[in-house]
Amino acid sequence: MTSPHPQEPGARRPRRHDPDRRDRLIEAALAVIAERGVAATTHREIARAADVPLGSMTYHFTSLDEILAEAFTRHADRVAAVFDQHLRAAPDRASAVDAVAGLVTGALLGSPQDLILAVELYAAAARKPALRAVTQAWMQRSRQALEVHFDPTTARELDALIEGLVLHSALSTDPMTPAQIRHAIDRHLR
């Protein structure tokens, strides 16, 4: 008589080889955060979005806070890379000012999902100190990119101005025009 199971008794089931599972979970976390917000993001929702068993969450992450930090870090790294690329491509300060204006009026606005993720990160970081480390690292990267063309104090102030201008542009029903944004940047740099 043959066994209904092809394995020998006591033999282990072969594990599914899924080397990208952790990465998919992080991407799924970003999608869930963008769709539902941090407050409604759960292990179960992330696992569902990644199409993996719920146990994968605790295998790859010690807590929900850990996956939130990793997901937001990934988002911040992507935005910081765009920021850095634009500023490093500027050969001089005047070009850097143009790059900053271009970032505010276009590249940093990104997709609606990018904006939602940034706003969710800001709100979550106000409540969770561990996420403040993510925002601090993001701000530090932005400042370093700006410091290629501006002194550290100006870079810090300009970074804050950029964040405010981007949020204003994205959320206002009457956003500033590109010319008004450029004027605000130029005025600050006088």
Image (cartoon, rainbow, N blue to C red):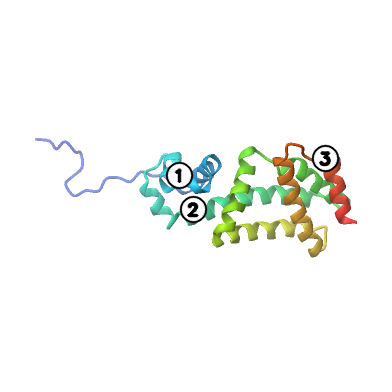
Task: List the residue tagged with mark 3.
Answer: 178
What kind of element bears circle 1? helix
**Looking at the image, which residue sits at the far right?**
190
**Looking at the image, which residue sits at the far front?**
173
Task: List the residue tagged with mark 2.
Answer: 67
Task: List the residue tagged with mark 1.
Answer: 46
Callout 2 amino acid: Ile
* Residue under the image location 64 percent in, 60 percent down: 136
Residue 32: x and y in percent read 50, 42
- Disc 3 crowd rating (10 Å Cα; few below 14, some 14-19, many 20+) is some
Circles 1, 2 touching at the beta carbon (< 8 Å): yes
The image quarter containing residue 158 is: bottom right
Q: Which mark is residue 4?
A: none
Q: Earlier in the sequence, mark 3 or mark 1?
A: 1
What kind of element bears circle 2? helix
Residue 153: x and y in percent read 80, 64
Counting every numbered tag in the picture gives: 3
The image quarter containing residue 174 is: top right
